[in-house]
Image: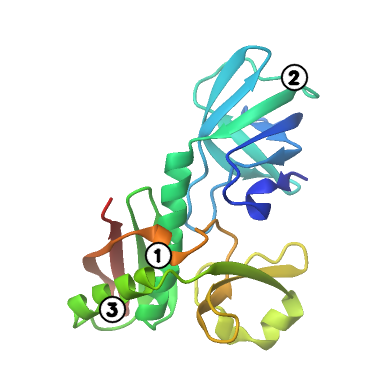
Amino acid sequence: MTRMLFREDAYLRDADARVIAHTPEGGVVLDATVFYPTGGGQPGDSGVLEWDGIRMPIATTLKAQDDQIALVPAEPQPLPGIGTYVTQSLDWDRRHRHMRVHTALHLLSVVVPFGVTGGSISANHGRLDFDMPESLENREAIEATLNAYVMEDAQVSEDWITAAELDENPGLIRTMAVKPPRGTGRVRLVRIGDVGDPIDLQPCGGTHVARTGEIGQLRLGRIEKKGRMNRRVYIHLDN
């Protein structure tokens, strides 16, 4: 099992670790990593591994078997041997933009109060698919409300509940297509705002900024019809 350092501190950019396995596809598995693996609509992290004067660019990061996380080299080259100590460094600008967009999508799910059927994140924009029959009527009001939440500079924090507690509170689950991560018997909740009166509270395994003010100005993008009961809504970072 890979220790998920990104879960302990989403702002950790570099860390030392030891190689514990290779995947059949040529990925490198570490005993602990700051690299987030592709999942929940958020892309896997990229960056660099270094050891013994060797530098290996990492193109992406994926989940592997047995709760391991595999760092995928950008180009074929000899992998560090099992037991080798390496230094891992994130492409921080890309990761931080993912964190900003991911947190902004949580706000979008509040402002557009329909079930979420899908979503994706990039370094410049994100989108959510909503289970709603009609398109949004007041784009300007939605964009203004999103940016008001950003300007509020609300704290983003986390809590943990048991899987049983989540089952007793199904209203916490906004996503209809993606199941909350339950593997350890505990479920991570991401909260935006005060504990007693949060703006948003929902299960999520991704990385987020510490305060909404870090997101920056948001712009509402296209709204597409993807089916009789499905609308896709895009938001963009302005910088």
Place of residue 74 in the rendered image (x, y in percent of width and height, measured from the top left): 49, 26
- Asked if residue 111 shows in the view, the reply is yes
SS for tag 3? loop
Q: Which residue in the structure is indicated by mark 3? A: 228
**Mark 1 burial class by Cα count in 10 Å: few <14, some 14-19, many 20+:** many
Q: CA distance from mark 3 to mark 1?
A: 26 Å
Q: Which residue is mark 2?
A: 81
Residue 217, image x and y in percent? Answer: 29, 61
In this picture, residue 229 sits left or right of residue 66: left
Residue type at mark 3: give it: Arg
Vertical side of 11 occupied by 189: above or below? below
Q: Between disc 2 and disc 1, whose residue precedes?
A: 2
Question: Disc 2, disc 3: CB below 8 Å?
Answer: no
Out of 115 and 85, give the one closest to the viewer. 85
**Mark nearer the viewer, 3 or 1:** 1
Q: In the rendered image, which quarter contains the N terminus?
A: top right
Q: Which residue is mark 1?
A: 104
Instruction: Identify the mark nearer the N-term, 3 or 1.
Output: 1
How far across and how far down the image is residue 62, in percent? 59, 42
Q: Secondary structure at mark 1?
A: helix
* Residue drawn at x 29%, y 73% as measured from the top left: 227
